[in-house]
Image (cartoon, helix red, strand yellow):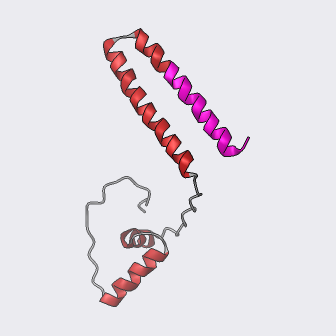
Amino acid sequence: MVSLASNKKLDTVLRVRCTGPDLIRWGHLADAYDETLSSMVRRLLDQVPHRPRLPLSSVNPILLRQIACAGNNLNQIARAVNAANLVGSRVQAVGILAQLAIIERQLGQLLKERSGT
């Protein structure tokens, strides 16, 4: 049995003949299960039971934007750390650590605001 969560490349095509109405009905059925027709067929052929996706919780868009900004800052810091390692600069490393401490505090504040404590 093949795992549906597999990261293997799906590079082979299975062709199935059917009527137009069957194809439409199967497509609607796959939509009802919130999956593609291909994934539904693989799941059914592998006899894997359907597991509904957990609903996504609503996220405050302002909080999401702030977290995205923090992630962008982390990417910039990672680039700076890599550049400092190439140059061997200890002064830059101290500045980078200071920036990381600031980001850590900001994320802590966001978590407090989100949890309401």
Q: Residue furthest right?
A: 117
Name the foreground residue: 4 vs 58: 58
Residue 57 in picture, x, y percent from top left: 59, 57
Q: Quadrant of the C terminus?
A: top right
User: Is residue 8 in the magenta section?
Assistant: no
Name the foreground residue: 111 vs 88: 111
On screen, 38 above or below 87?
Answer: below
On screen, 7 above or below 110?
Answer: below
The magenta segment is 98-117
Identified at 54% across, 51% down, the residue is 61
Q: Quadrant of residue 9 in the image? A: bottom left
Main SS of residues in magenta: helix
Identified at 53% across, 47% down, the residue is 64
Identified at 67% across, 39% down, the residue is 112
Q: In the picture provided, is 19 more to the left or to the right than 40?
A: left
Q: Quadrant of residue 17 in the image? A: bottom left
User: Is residue 103 in the magenta section?
Assistant: yes
Q: In the picture provided, is 79 more to the left or to the right than 17?
A: right
Q: Quadrant of residue 114 in the image? A: top right
